[in-house]
Image (cartoon, grey):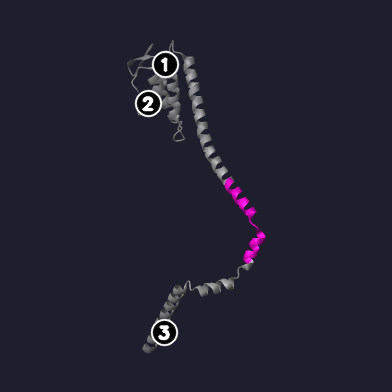
Amino acid sequence: MIKTTFRDKEVNVKEQLTIVESLSFINSVADTVVDLEDNTFSPLFFDIALISNFIISYTDIEQPDLEDVYANLNEYQTFVENTCYADNFNRSQYNYVMDSINSTIEFNKQQIIHKQTSALDEIAVQLSNLLSTLNSKAQELDVKKLDKVIKKLNPEAILKAYQKSGIGDDVRDKAIEELRNENIKLKNDISARNVKA
């Protein structure tokens, strides 16, 4: 155990971490910087997470308030740097942990990129399948038969059939009635003006 001080209080510092403590340290920092659930990358949190986890993992200081760490970043960084250079502190293990944190962050960033790329690839595959289906259906069309059907369509015959069916008679009759009423109103207005003149 290494003895040092922080903010005028005596602090005990571990010389090195166990493998479980190292993994916890690495994952906590990496997960804070790269959130795989929300697919976000927040490099602003790197120093804050690193310092907070250093204090939790290596020292007997109570877990620091993150706002305090952020507000006093230089003070905390100086404490961590000085502690890392204390006699008996296992700097090679700490450097390995730092390398592992950086590797894990990079790996997690690549996972986010891969998720986004996979989603775009899935959309591209679905569009490709749709276009293939449309293309095959278009090739199945017999253009000669389609041309014959179009020629058989006689617009005059369709219009006569529509008129004979009686469909739309109510709409036609209502429109005629409205025009007749409007015409009568206009005649009355004109007659009224002529009488006044």
> Mark 1: which secondary structure?
helix
In the image, what residue occupies the spot 51% across and 28% down?
107
Q: Residue at x 57, y 46 (%)?
A: 127
Q: Percent from the top left, x then y, of residue 118?
A: 54, 37
Which image quarter is the N terminus in?
top left
Q: Residue at x 38, y 28 (%)?
A: 70
Given residues 50 and 8, the one toward you in this image is 50
Give the mark nearest the N terminus, 1 or 2.
Answer: 2
Question: Which numbered disc, 1 or 3, marks the residue that appears first in the sequence?
Answer: 1
- Furthest toward the right, the residue is 144
- Closest to the observer, 163 or 67: 163
Q: Amino acid at mark 3?
A: Lys
Which amino acid is tagged 2?
Val
Provide the residue designation for mark 2: 69
Callout 3: 10 Å neighbours few (<14), some, many (20+)?
Answer: few
**Callout 3 secondary element:** helix
Q: Is 174 above or below relative to 80?
A: below
User: How much space separates mark 3 and mark 2, taking CA atoms?
Assistant: 89 Å
Q: Main secondary structure of the magenta part?
A: helix
In the rendered image, which residue does mark 1 sit on? 83
Which portion, as a residue range, is magenta?
A: 129-150
- Specify the quadrant of the image occupied by residue 76: top left
Residue 130 magenta: yes
Q: Residue furthest left?
A: 9
Q: Position of residue 101 (x, y in %)?
A: 48, 24
Query: Can you tell which of label 1 and label 3 is closer to the viewer?
Result: 3
Task: Give percent across and percent down for residue 149.
Answer: 62, 64
Q: The disc labelled 1 sits on which kind of residue?
A: Thr
* Residue sitting at x 40%, y 19%: 57
- Number of numbered labels in the structure image: 3
